């Protein structure tokens, strides 16, 4: 529509010989469908009263006037009356009567006899004539004239009333249309910013004031401005004025800090539309204090608010009072009410209303501090309740559901506690809600906030000194659980030192246990043994209940120190793991045991353990353990040989994407480049496309569908591990050790070690014997020794391994 107006203006100018450079005129942008809908409703004989409602500055009046500016109504009388400055019903009907007289007679004199009122005179004047009456901005008198409107419609059968306002008449036959802000996102496939109506209006307004065009870079900033203002047309037009004076970047900074925009400079703009603040504040004196208090509290929330959260904000014991306040705010177009997929109502402030509330709070610091403190305390109480429920398997699902829509506000609570000098309380809340951050994709955000506790530039206080080691311990535990043992070691080592400095033996012992497990995972077995042994000695007096997990970690450490493996010891550890009462401990330990099986070349057994983890009923709510198990499956496929390389790559790519999708940091040691090098760019790109859309459940289904095949007992290769069988087969093709290493992506000395085990197990003295055995598929036979000696040679010669 704006483009049409510009082209028409340019065409007219060219016709008279005037040169115009990209001048624009005010236009109604992005409202074509709404205008058509309003006209359709006005043409419907069943609708006699149509009310356009919406938040301040959304463009109700312009939409109504545009809908009435057409020839579709034929000879019908169209009367437009602005009631913004009217407070008494008598004055309202006097103005309407004057408008009717002026439109019908061309006279502004309305004669009212002594025996009648303005309303009765209006009724007599309209009578049966077809009239379309616009009652614009009727907020001040809507409640006082509602019954008169009903009587007027009753007695004037051909009258159609179109009203605008933030409130409705609340009449039975009233048809209400809510005017929404302009869309701020693009429907284009490539997401070009200039395709959203909100951005188009902003650009049009800027170019009209600039008398020029805008750069592409500016449009990108304009897109951010349009989103920050929530697509409210009045705010966008005021932002255009600010842009012409300070530039787009400065305007965006002003909006983000909550400052008001430059007032409209036009003399024909009504006072209530000079600024966004004035537009929102108009007629708010009709709302009771309880509803305003709730609105201020909701403006501090980071996400949409449901009824239960609203009750929490105002501390209401009776939900009915909260519902009344919410209904009042929705009725005055200060809240947007939407319905979730589950059928519940949620409430959200418009961007301009939120900015208005923030200005009110900033103006009164005492109220601001009181409301923020009460809000933080109530969210801390909610966090404590959720933490108690998380500790119970029966209530865990409910706890995660309760926290689902409040994660942004809970994170904001932790941030506020740190900023106001309560870091220890902040770390405690963050630790209590550990599973909430993981399950709802906020772990990275939570880590970023807790990291602020480690700021060494802050003035040291007892609270900060106590919070720092606890914060490092928490971050270290999260790093270990998410597969980043190197980061965990760095954080936990420093945390242990600070715990010892402040004399906290319990904290130091607790850190030692976690740090020992981190060292075990990276292969520092001696250091791990020292730390785990120290922690195990303190479990009885310091933190009873952790003895069994630490004992299992010690047992796994002992197995890891024996490279030949011990099936009986592994089985005993497995049974101990299954008896652990906490699912997080149990699932993590099973994945750790799977890695031990990989260390003794039992990829099939490792895969079975990882399958047990992902098939666990808790897998959907234990994402870190599930991701670790999926990566364990990928490692098992990788160790099983080249036949499973594609499966390993698919799971690795899928899990990496799932970590990003769920806000979980990437684990150490996963390098996708090795799969690209081994499979080639074409196949690797196919894998990326196929696995990019996998959900967690689909990734689990995929790994369950690809079991590792183990050699049959009668096979010549049955005695070998998966990797040893693969090396043996490649030896049979004539490959050298270096070629095999390159093919499998392993070190050449690793190939030599595998080949040595192959020759010992198959009782072969040379590579040739191995090749012949593989080609024939015959059972292993002892290689004959010197003449007359029937005994087998114990070990192959070194030169036969080359």
Image (cartoon, helix red, strand yellow):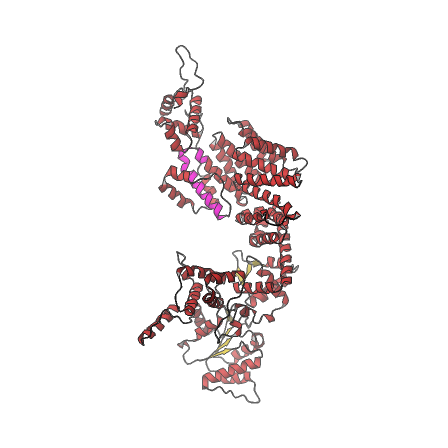
Q: Is 648 one of the magenta-colored residues? A: yes
Task: Measuring from the top left, give residue 800's x and y in whole percent.
Answer: 39, 21
Does residue 726 lie above or below 235 as drawn? above
Q: Residue 285 sits in which quadrant?
A: bottom right
| Residue 296 image point, x, y percent | 60, 63
Residue 130 visible somewhere in the drawing: yes
- Inspect the magenta stretch and tell me whether residue 414 lies in it: no
Q: Indicate the position of residue 566 as horizontal and vertical percent values.
A: 53, 27
Please, which residue is most extreme toward the bottom here? 114
Q: Quarter of the image containing the C terminus?
A: top left
* Residue located farthest toward the right when viewing the structure as drawn: 541
What residue range appears in magenta? 636-661
Q: Which of 41 and 731 is in front in this view?
A: 731
Q: Count the labels in the image.
A: 0
Q: Position of residue 453 (x, y in %)?
A: 59, 48
Residue toward you, 247 or 735: 247
Residue 784 position by quadrant: top left
Q: Is residue 113 above or below residue 708?
A: below
Quadrant in which the N terminus appears: bottom left
Residue 395 visible in the picture? no
In the picture, residue 709 is in which quadrant?
Answer: top left
- Closest to the observer: 130 or 412? 412
Left-right relation of 676 to 167: left
Identify which residue, 702 or 16, lies in the foreground.
16
Q: Main secondary structure of the magenta part?
A: helix
């Amino acid at each position: 529509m704006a483009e049409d107006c510009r082209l028409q203006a340019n065409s007219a100018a060219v016709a008279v010989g005037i040169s115009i450079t990209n001048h624009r005129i005010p236009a109604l942008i992005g409202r074509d469908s709404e205008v058509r809908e309003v006209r359709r409703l006005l043409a419907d004989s069943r609708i006699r009263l149509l009310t356009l409602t919406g938040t301040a500055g959304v463009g109700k009046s312009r939409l109504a006037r545009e809908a009435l500016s057409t020839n579709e109504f034929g000879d019908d009388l169209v009367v437009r009356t602005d009631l913004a400055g009217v407070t008494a019903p008598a004055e309202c009907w006097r103005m309407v009567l004057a408008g009717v007289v002026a439109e019908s007679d061309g006279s502004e004199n309305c004669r009212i006899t002594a025996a009648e009122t303005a309303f009765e005179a209006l009724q007599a004047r309209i009578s049966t004539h077809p009239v379309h009456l616009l009652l614009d901005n009727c907020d001040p008198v809507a409640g006082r004239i509602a019954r008169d409107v009903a009587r007027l419609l009753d007695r004037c059968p051909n009258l159609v009333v179109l009203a605008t306002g933030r409130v409705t008449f609340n009449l039975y036959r009233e048809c209400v249309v809510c005017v929404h802000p302009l869309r701020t996102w693009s429907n284009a496939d490539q997401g070009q910013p200039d395709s959203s109506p909100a951005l188009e209006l902003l650009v049009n307004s800027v170019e009209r004031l600039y008398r020029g065009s805008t750069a592409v870079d500016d449009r990108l900033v304009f897109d951010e401005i349009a989103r920050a203002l929530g697509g409210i047309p009045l705010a966008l037009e005021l932002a255009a004025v600010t842009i012409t004076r300070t530039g787009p970047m400065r305007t965006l900074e002003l909006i983000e800090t909550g400052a008001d925009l430059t007032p409209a400079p036009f003399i024909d703009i009504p006072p209530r539309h000079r600024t966004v603040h004035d537009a929102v504040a108009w007629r708010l004196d009709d709302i009771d204090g309880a509803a305003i208090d709730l609105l201020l509290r909701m403006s501090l929330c980071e996400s949409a608010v449901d009824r239960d959260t609203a009750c929490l904000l105002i501390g209401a014991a009776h939900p009915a009072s909260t519902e009344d306040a919410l209904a009042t705010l929705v009725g005055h177009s200060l809240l947007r009410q939407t319905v979730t997929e589950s059928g519940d109502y949620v409430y959200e402030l418009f961007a301009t209303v939120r900015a208005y509330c923030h200005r009110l709070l900033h103006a009164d610091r005492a109220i601001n501090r009181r409301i923020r403190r009460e809000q933080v305390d109530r969210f801390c109480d909610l966090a404590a309740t959720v933490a108690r429920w998380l500790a119970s398997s029966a209530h865990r699902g409910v706890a995660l559901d309760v926290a689902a829509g409040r994660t942004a506000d809970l994170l904001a609570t932790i941030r506020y506690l740190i900023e106001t000098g309560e870091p220890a309380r902040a770390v405690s809340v963050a630790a209590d809600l550990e599973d909430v951050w993981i399950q709802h994709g906020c772990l990275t955000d939570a880590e970023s906030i807790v990291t602020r506790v480690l700021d060494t530039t802050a003035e040291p206080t007892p609270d900060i000194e106590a919070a720092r080691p606890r914060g490092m311990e928490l971050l270290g535990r999260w790093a270990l659980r998410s597969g980043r043992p190197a980061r965990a070691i760095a954080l936990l080592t420093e945390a242990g030192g600070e715990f010892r400095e402040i004399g906290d033996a319990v904290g130091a012992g607790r850190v030692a246990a976690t740090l020992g497990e981190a060292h075990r995972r990276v292969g520092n077995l001696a250091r791990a043994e020292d730390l785990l042994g120290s922690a195990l000695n303190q479990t009885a007096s310091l933190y009873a209940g952790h003895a069994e997990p630490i004992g299992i970690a010690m047992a796994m450490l002992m197995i890891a120190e024996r490279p030949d493996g011990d099936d009986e010891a592994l089985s005993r550890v497995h049974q101990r793991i299954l008896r652990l009462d906490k699912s997080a401990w149990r699932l993590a330990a099973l994945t750790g045991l799977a890695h031990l099986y990989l260390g003794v070349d039992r990829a099939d057994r490792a895969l079975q353990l990882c399958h047990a983890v992902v098939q666990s009923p808790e897998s959907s709510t234990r994402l870190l353990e599930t991701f670790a198990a999926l990566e364990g499956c990928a490692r098992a496929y990788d160790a099983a040989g080249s036949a499973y390389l594609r499966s390993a790559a698919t799971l690795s790519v899928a899990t990496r994407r799932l970590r990003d999708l769920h806000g979980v940091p990437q684990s150490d040691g996963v390098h996708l480049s090795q799969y690209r090098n081994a499979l080639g760019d074409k196949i690797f790109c196919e894998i990326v496309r196929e696995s990019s859309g996998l959900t967690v459940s689909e990734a689990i289904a995929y790994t369950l569908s690809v079991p590792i095949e183990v050699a049959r007992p009668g096979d010549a290769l049955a005695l070998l591990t998966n990797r040893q069988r693969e090396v043996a087969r490649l030896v049979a093709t004539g490959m050298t050790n270096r070629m095999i290493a390159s093919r499998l992506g392993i070190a050449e000395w690793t190939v030599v070690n595998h080949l040595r085990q192959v020759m010992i197990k198959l009782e072969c003295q040379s590579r040739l014997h191995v090749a012949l055995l593989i080609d024939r598929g015959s059972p292993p036979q002892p290689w004959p020794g010197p003449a007359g000696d029937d005994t087998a040679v114990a070990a192959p010669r070194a030169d036969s391994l080359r």
